[in-house]
Image (spheres, rainbow, N blue to C red):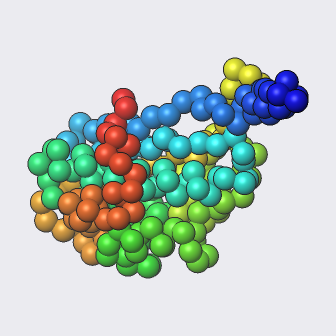
Amino acid sequence: MINKKLLACIAVTSALFMSGCSMTTSSKTLVNIVDDDPTKLYVKADRDSTSLGFLNIGNVVRKNYKIAMGVAASETIKRGYKYFTIIDPYKYTSLMNEKKPTNLQEFYDMCDQGDDRFHMGVSFRNTIQEGTKCDSIVYAWDDATLTGGTVKHRAVRFVARLSNEKLNDQSLDAQEVLNAEIIKELGSELLEPTE
């Protein structure tokens, strides 16, 4: 009886391992200065991924979005500034100008609900997704695992301008972002660049 249960457990574990469900191939958060301008930061968060494709891809995009915002806020403060304003890509900033979010929750809701929300379906290309304006900050790609499975990535990336004064109504107070519940729930270790 015990041998049958043990064999069943080993079979299920092996199936998950071989499918790639339990394996992440890479995980990183990148922050770089743009054009030798210390007030312009490129932020890229690719800390969450999934091998379950369309079943979990929405959660991956949402989590990486929160991480990117948290990292931008953390780096803003570390570099001696108070605010950050997303200035690129253009499609995303044009959505900000239309929707006029003024705090992190409104930024999050802007891309989680409505016509311009993140595209949560399956992507068959390793390129920036065409579609909604929120998708313009998502880079979709797949990574093979050692066991022959595939891990789906949806990295969130943008360029932010750092400042001590609000540049416009969409400038975010970095400390307020870090104090937001949707950032606190991530834990501080995810808010540190890995490269």
Provide residue 161's location: percent of width, then percent of height.
26, 54
Provide residue 26's location: percent of width, then percent of height.
54, 30
Q: Is residue 149 left or right of residue 126?
A: right
Q: Relative to 60, say whether 113 is above or below.
A: below
Provide residue 176's location: percent of width, then percent of height.
23, 65
Q: Is residue 83 left or right of residue 7?
A: left
Q: Relative to 72, say whether 38 is above or below.
A: above
Question: Hey, which residue is sitting farthest front in the picture?
Answer: 1
Provide residue 75's location: percent of width, then percent of height.
24, 46
Residue 44 seen in render: yes
Front in this rendered view, residue 149 or 141: 149
Report the quarter where the N terminus lies. Answer: top right
| Residue in view at x 16 percent, y 44 percent | 79
| Residue in view at x 48 percent, y 73 percent | 110
Report the quarter where the C terminus lies. Answer: top left
Tally of numbered tags = 0
Front in this rendered view, residue 175 or 81: 175
| Residue in view at x 62 percent, y 58 percent | 58
Residue 7 appears in which quarter of the rendering? top right
Q: Is residue 127 left or right of residue 190?
A: right
Residue 150 seen in render: no
Q: Relative to 10, say whether 37 is above or below.
A: below
Question: Hey, which residue is sitting farthest top in the picture?
Answer: 146
Q: Is residue 130 left or right of residue 137?
A: right
| Residue in view at x 12 percent, y 60 percent | 164
